Image: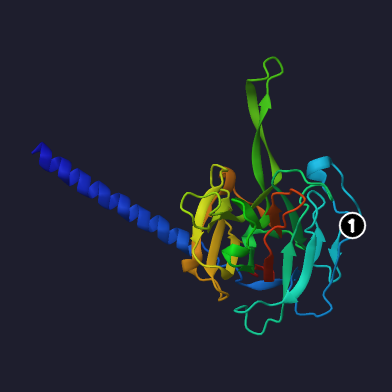
Amino acid sequence: MLLQWNRFFTRHCLALVAGTSMLMAGAELQAQVIPGTGTRIDGSWDDFEDESWEYVPNLPKSSTNVDKQTRYPLGQSTNGVWTESAKRGQMDVIQRVPTPAGGLPGSKGALLLKTLHTGVPGHGSRSSNQDDLIMNGTMVSVGLSPSVITRVYLPPFEEWEDKTGTSFGFRAAVKAPMKSSTPSRRRFFRTIGSSTKIETIYLGMFIQFNSKTDSASGEDSAVFVVRADTSGQDFIGPEIKQTGWWTLGMSFTPDGRVHYYASPGVDPLTPADRFASHAPYGTRIQSFHTAFFNVCNQDNGRTWSTEWIIDDPAMYYLAR
């Protein structure tokens, strides 16, 4: 009798868990907004089709994160869409180029990003660093379901910087309430409470290269590394099994979560391309502000980064 009851209880509990999981998955699916949905935000997109497109670097670039030197004026594009990061500085090469084969239909121009000195200009640091290029954005409440989308060209693996590590990032700046502990004056290692304030947090998708030089498998590979999950940790996303064009996107929904999408090719994203959703750092996002790109290298003063090409980045929102 007891055995029969245990079987009955286990079977019905499993059914309840499965049913609850299906309901949660269904609710999660309904909450999604596919990146690129809605109205494109004026001034927060670029197709690089203007043959006169130009970026003025205003050298030397900033390296505030390394030596606390912010070197104004910052670099910027002549169309006003792009600006140098005051914190890390811009890539050493930011150049309009012909769109690689397989790109968006009708696209004739795209943007090449590569860099040598990711730290202090003209000085190698012998450690990995990154440069940033920031897209002109505007504050959009998550109540309007903002999103950002881009196409990225991944060159053949044999053309990547031959080092295992982060090579590229597609990022977003958002604001959210973050808790901080208040230290005790008597005993620093103890806390007497916590406070909450609105802070900027930086989310996004990195592309990590795993060089065959450093691998026991003897093969080059790449994977998405994503920031961040509910605990605030980076996590591994989809494996990159083919190079060439990819479409990447992030959307931010009224429930305060971020949703990550990636798909090989240049077709519009679909619900099936979503690979993760999180309330990052265990908080609820309040507003989306801008997007930016990272290019990383080992900053030894000799080795150029991988050449990255982006096309048609744009921000969207759902009008009420």
**Residue furthest bottom in the image:** 106
Residue closer to the observer: 157 or 249: 157
**Residue furthest top in the image:** 186
Crowd rating for badge 1 (residues with CA inside 10 Å; few <14, some 14–19, many 20+): some
Residue 174 shows in the view: yes
Residue closer to the observer: 285 or 133: 133
Q: Residue at x 85, y 63 (%)?
A: 76
Residue 198 lies, in percent from the top left, at: 70, 44
Residue 6 lies, in percent from the top left, at: 16, 40
- Residue 266 vertical position relative to residue 133 in the rendered view, above or below: below
Q: Which residue position is annotated with label 1?
A: 59
- Residue 286 vertical position relative to residue 249 in the rendered view, above or below: above
Q: Is residue 53 left or right of residue 320?
A: right
Residue 289 shows in the view: no
Residue closer to the observer: 157 or 269: 157
Residue 86 lies, in percent from the top left, at: 82, 51
Residue closer to the observer: 124 or 70: 124
Residue 317 lies, in percent from the top left, at: 65, 67
Residue 318 falls in which quadrant of the image?
bottom right
Amino acid type, residue under disc 1 in the picture: Leu
Residue 249 falls in which quadrant of the image?
bottom right
Secondary element under disc 1, as helix, strand or loop, is loop
Q: Quadrant of the N terminus?
A: top left
Q: Residue at x 81, y 61 (%)?
A: 83
Q: In which quarter of the image is the C terminus?
A: bottom right
